[in-house]
Image: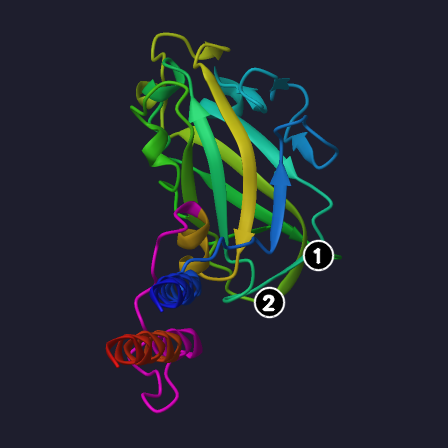
Amino acid sequence: MKKLFILLTVTCLMLSLFAGSIWVNAQEPGYKLSFEGGLGEQLKPENAGIDVMAHSGSKQAAKFNMYNIAWAGRYGATAFLFTGLNIEVGAEKNRYVVFEAAVDELAAKNCFDNLASLYLPAGGDWAPTGASVDSLSSLHNATALEFQYIIIDLGWNADAVVDTLRFDVRASSLETSADPTNDNAYNCGFLYLRSAAFFDTLDDAKTYVDPSYVPTPDDTTNPETGDTGFFAGIMLAMVATGVVIMAKKRQMM
């Protein structure tokens, strides 16, 4: 009977772990670009004449040379394109993109307060996304070469099929760049981009960044139906507890 009790107790613990696993799942992106092994075919410089990029094997990421170029009106800047996407977007479709990015010590001095983001729909013309100008501001004064996840709300205001996304990463002025003394040089450090992953909702993006993140339940959830995973977990725990209690009673008889 003692062995049976131990077996049933272990079973109870396993069922409890299974119920808990319902809550924590690694969120898969709807679409992902990875530059760990190379630049690939979809990452392009926005302007091949000034936007310099390469692959960093040691950082396993795309490496962008940041610059001040007055005639282009770009300071603490680099610009790049994601091409050949062919992804559906909308208010609840691929709305959030998560950058896995880092900067070196010099690039961290750029303010990253003037992001511009555009998209090219299939068969259409360039249009702005709804991304905030300060979406990448966490890179300012960031720890050198420490990768971080940055969630950008692209704020789509219409459904579309997007072929190309453009990101102009910039400081708002020469004074807010890494080197305010020279307006015509590659003198603003390096930006590293390891991946870009797209998600429908903010909760999905947050779960990707932190698998332990638990979304706040929607107040409109029907209390009679509730969350399937939640009640499944409760039922499993109740069944397991009942089995252990029965085993104890048998042992006492």
The answer to which of 217 and 173 lies nearer the viewer is 217
Who's the residue at 62% across and 51% down the image? 31
Are discs 2 and 1 less than 8 Å apart at CB?
Answer: no
Near mark 2 (Cα within 10 A), the count class, few <14, some 14-19 or many ≥20, is few
In the displayed structure, 108 sits above or below 217; it is: above
| Position in image of residue 120 (x %, y %) | 66, 50
User: Which segment is the magenta one?
Assistant: 209-234
Which image quadrant: the N terminus? bottom left
**Residue at the left extreme?**
252
Give residue 85's position: percent from left, percent from top: 69, 49
Kindly identify which residue carries mark 2.
159
Q: Which image quarter holds the C terminus?
A: bottom left
Left or right side of 46 for 76: left
Is 249 contained in the magenta span? no
Q: Amino acid at mark 2?
A: Asp
Instruction: Write the residue at 46% across / 62% down.
Output: 201
Q: CA distance from mark 2 to mark 1?
A: 13 Å
Residue 232 in the image, given as x and y percentages of width and height: 42, 77
Residue type at numbered disc 1: Gly
Residue 35 placement: quadrant = top right
Q: Nearer the viewer, residue 23 or 236?
A: 236
Q: Mark 2 or mark 1: which comes first in sequence?
A: 1
Image point (38%, 42%), residue name: 135
Which residue, given by chain and number where applicable, does mark 1 sit on? 124
How crowded pointer 1 is (Cα within 10 Å; few <14, some 14-19, many 20+) is rated as: few
